[in-house]
Image (tube, helix red, strand yellow):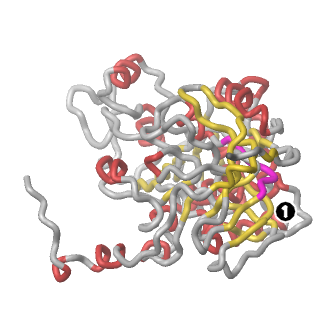
Amino acid sequence: MTVTEKKPEEKTAGEQERETLPGVTIHGLHDAKRLMKAAEYRGKQSIKVIDRPMPLVTDAEDAILKVSSTCICGSDLHLYLGTIPGMKPGQVMGHEFMGTVVEVGVGVKDVKAGDRVVACFDIGCGRCFLCKQGAFSCCEATNPNVQMKELYGHQISGMFGYSQITGGYDGGQAEYVRVPFADVNLLKVPPDMPDEKIVFLSDILPTAWNACEMGDVSQGDVVAIWGCGPVGILTAQCAMFRGAARVIVIDEHAYRLVSVKEGLAKMTVHGPDVGIEAVGQHYAHSLTHKIEMKLHLETDPSEVLNEIIYCTRKAGRISIVGVYAGFTKNFNIGEWPGYGWLMFACAFMEKGQQMRGSQTPVQKFWHHLLELVQSGKLDPSVVVTHRPPLEEAGHAYKVFNEKLENCIKVVLKPTHAPLIVRQVI
């Protein structure tokens, strides 16, 4: 089939708008004379902290951030394990971070050098149709990757440290990082609040809140959460704050349940009103799914989603915030005559359920969530168990991935030793 370019009058309003959106430089300028520490992806299950050139302001709306805290997210483990396409050696990891602004471009108006800020994981331009609707994680301007468009039909926004498929931006597991469209993607925070109270405004706290938003969690609801990692724990906290009568958390690791166990119901008669998927895609348990993934017949097991469909009540709501890579087989969408017992007998369409999923538009929620954290109504710091220096990132990934030492959440702390200055000829 031959695809011909559309004439101007044949283009939709969205297509015309994309041609006028602000440009962004993916791989910014660097100062080769000054070196900093950064955690690089070197291959499957290999993260190395090395010296890299310092980032510089490249576009007019950039800011350079001196990182004070940077986290390992459960989503980073998908990259670490090699299950996300487009990951290349040399990628600086990390999309949850905060710090102090040290330099801004001439087009930055709202933040300045010296401001203490949190960065969001999703990179929005603030000016496209979707950003104006609050859907920053679907920004039209920040991710030029064609592979994602071929896989999903459209690109989502660019993301820090999350492979070429989301733009190939350097991440924040480094001593310094460049943040494009700084006025959109940085949130000024109070100088007197500990990092661990506010660094999770970058991702997992808004993601937990978004899980509740998509499931319309409200007063009196029974909420079941599959996955008691950091996102699952904070989702339970958000659900209780929003008035849920009961929160049921499901996980195979008993130590993870301890921090949310008190006050949570263990059973309900009719099934939960809301089922929230906070697990993600690389946890295949059945032999069938393991074989299908090995043979590339699917990239993501449907076990958890099918279980949620089965357990959530008729006309209930299902919310997906766990990261999936591609496609799944055996999704329980309707009846399968003769195999009903195997497919949990009743399915998504038959039960009249609603299902929503999204990468979280952090900027939509973080002002409200900062207020809740400041007032003590939410406390995301409860998930932190490990605080190694950035230089130990490689080992920290291993601990987090293998769930050693009862690890729930890792916050890496850059030491900011004096910058290395090298002679460049």
| Furthest-left residue in this view | 1
Judging depth in this view, the residue of 205 and 30 nearest the camera is 30
Direction from residue 32 to residue 157 in the image, left or right: left
Element at badge 1? loop
Magenta-colored span: 66-72
Which three-letter amino acid code belongs to the residue tagged 1? Gly
* Residue under label 1: 376
Q: Looking at the picture, how far across and down is residue 188, in whole percent?
A: 76, 71
Q: Residue at x 55, y 38 (%)?
A: 279
Q: Residue at x 67, y 31 (%)?
A: 48
Q: Tell me if mark 1 has few (under 14), some (14-19) or many (20+) residues whose alpha carbon lies within 10 angstroms of its own.
A: few
Question: Residue 213 sits in which quadrant?
Answer: bottom right
Q: Residue at x 64, y 28 (%)?
A: 401
Judging depth in this view, the residue of 271 and 404 nearest the camera is 404
Q: Is residue 364 visible?
A: no
Direction from residue 52 to residue 314 in the image, left or right: left
Q: Looking at the picture, how far across and down is residue 366, in whole percent?
A: 67, 67
